[in-house]
Amino acid sequence: MKFNTIIPKGLKEHYQSELSLYRLSLNQKEYTVAWKHLERSHILGQAYPYEHTYSHWLMLKFGFRQKNTKEVLGQLLRLAVGGWKSFIDHIPTGNTGGSNVPPLKKMDLPQDLSIILNQYKPT
């Protein structure tokens, strides 16, 4: 069994970039764009417990900000189980992390994120 604990430096830079774009969009009240960046951060970080959990934490806060009960409840569930799934490398690739998709549903990766993730696949 493989244990994921530390995100590779280059991948973390892409993850952090998505979070920066999220915050910028949020500050500009571009909520749809902000959410897309949160989803992208989730995709990039979901294999690593800290980044995965942090993306869900931000999604929970976003759900509260939007007064979206479904999102809040969905994120509470994901926060309870998401991190340990990352730790044991049992994640649904491409899943965007929001409550609008089943937690274990594999999804197609956006092409740019697929290229990034393939650069940091363990050998």
Image: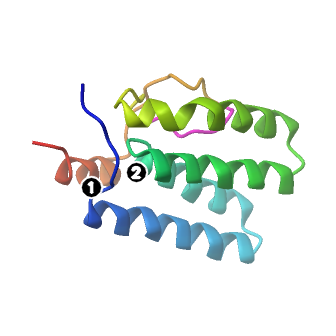
Whether label 1 touches label 2, CB < 8 Å: yes
Query: What residue lies at 44% left-to-right and 43% top-to-bottom?
Result: 46
Q: Quick one: quadrant of the C terminus?
A: top left
- The secondary structure that most of the magenta stretch takes on is loop
Amino acid type indicated by mark 2? Leu
- The residue beneath circle 2 is 44
Query: What residue lies at 73% left-to-right and 36% top-to-bottom?
Result: 76
Q: Which region of the structure is painted magenta?
A: 95-100
Label 1's element? Answer: helix
From the viewer's perspective, is residue 88 above or below residue 23? above
Of residues 112 and 54, which is closer to you in this image? 54
- Spot the residue most to the left: 123
Q: In the figure, is residue 45 to the left or right of 38?
A: left
What percent of the width, then of the height, locates residue 91? Answer: 41, 30
- The answer to which image quadrant residue 85 occupies is top left
Q: Quick one: quadrant of the N terminus?
A: top left
The numbered disc on residue 52 is none
Query: What residue lies at 48% left-to-right and 51% top-to-bottom?
Result: 50
What percent of the width, then of the height, locates residue 98? Answer: 64, 38
What percent of the width, then of the height, locates residue 117? Answer: 27, 49
- The residue beneath circle 1 is 116
Disc 2 packing (10 Å; few <14; some 14–19; many ≥20): many
What percent of the width, then of the height, locates residue 111? Answer: 31, 48
Query: What residue lies at 54% left-to-right and 66% top-to-bottom?
Result: 19
**Mark 1 or 2 closer to N-term?**
2
